[in-house]
Amino acid sequence: MKWQKVRNIYINKWILFENIEPYLKDGKRIIEELSVVNFQRCGKT
């Protein structure tokens, strides 16, 4: 799943994700595809 799609689905939530096929570019780790493992609503409980 692409990051923008995850952001649209899991609005205002903490997301635990697994990166799929990351790579390095200019010393930075780039994650283009990810899989959501778990999520938690943000804010007071």
Image: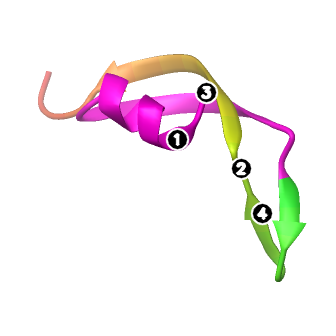
Q: Nearer the viewer, residue 14 or 25?
A: 25
Of the two numbered discs 2 and 1 on the same chain, state the one appearing first in sequence.
Answer: 1
What crowding class fits label 3: few (fewer than 14 Cα within 10 Å), some (14-19), or many (20 or more)? few
The residue where tag 3 is placed is 1
The residue where tag 1 is placed is 3
Q: Where residue 28 sits in the image (x, y, percent)?
A: 76, 73
Labels 2 & 4 near each other (Cβ < 8 A):
yes
Regarding residue 20, the answer to whether it shows in the image is yes
Q: The C terminus lies in which quarter of the figure?
A: top left
Q: CA distance from mark 2 to mark 4?
A: 7 Å
Of the two numbered discs 3 and 4 on the same chain, state the one appearing first in sequence.
Answer: 3
Q: Where residue 37 sits in the image (x, y, percent)?
A: 61, 17
- The amino acid sitting under disc 4 is Arg
What crowding class fits label 4: few (fewer than 14 Cα within 10 Å), some (14-19), or many (20 or more)? few
Query: Residue at image x 12%, y 30%?
Result: 44
Front of the two marks 1 and 4? 1
Quadrant in which residue 26 is drawn: bottom right
Q: Is residue 9 above or below residue 19?
A: above
Q: Is residue 15 above or below residue 23?
A: above
